[in-house]
Image (cartoon, rainbow, N blue to C red):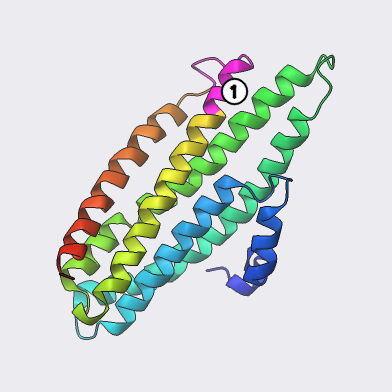
Amino acid sequence: MTDSTDIPTSRPLDAWLDALSQPTGSPGGGAAAGVMLGLATGLMGMVAGYTRDDDAVTEIAGGLDGTRAELLEAVEADGVVSADLGAALARASEDPEREEAVRGAALDAGASVARLGRIGITVVDEARTLAAHGNPHVAVDLAVATEALAAGLAGASLNLRANLQLARRHGASAAMQAGLDEEVGRLAEARTQVSRITAELSARLD
């Protein structure tokens, strides 16, 4: 597992948010979705830590740490492809290579955010396990985690759809987008599942 301190994304939060607020697109919406997924896994890890003597929770606790590190790596990589897409779009309209450059960069950006979404999908079952077995005293923290998970999945889906639309506008064929279109449906289904978990957790708070 990669140590999070070795990942550039682990710079101070205020510095990262400042970078996000700049009109550079790197980091951008895809990276922000990844950070929301990271927040979700962090809170889920906390809930797991507060849950003792439950084999089902113990089994997933260590995996959440690895997932969070994987997300940080994917967030950093997304910032790089986001910058590449911005550079491609900034090319002069009369540049004969602009069409191909934008198409390729949009597909790369789509693949990057799809990777973030796939990582997020992997923790849906963990969220369900924590909802069933987690310490009830931190149910509200788990509910916040699942809200963040749903938001991250939605953000990944929105960015993926936008990147695919841009790629199509610049000549991408169905073959070029093979696999990425299916990811949109998987993200939507995962978000629906997470919303159900959140609703169940929310009902316990009344």
Q: Which residues are magenta?
A: 164-176
Image quadrant for the C terminus?
bottom left
Residue 94 is situated, as x and y percent measured from the top left of the image, at 84, 14
Query: Residue at left 20%, top 64%?
Result: 201
Query: Residue at left 66%, top 69%?
Result: 14
Q: Residue furthest front?
A: 206
Residue situated in front as seen by the camera: 108 or 89: 89
Q: Amino acid at mark 1?
A: Ala
Query: Residue at left 28%, top 62%?
Result: 127
Residue 25 is situated, as x and y percent measured from the top left of the image, at 68, 44
Residue 11 is situated, as x and y percent measured from the top left of the image, at 67, 69
Mark 1 neighbour density, 10 Å: few (under 14) some (14–19) many (20 or more): many
In the image, residue 92 above or below residue 129? above
In the image, residue 10 above or below residue 118? below
Residue situated in front as seen by the camera: 3 or 15: 15
Please name the residue that numbered disc 1 is placed on.
167
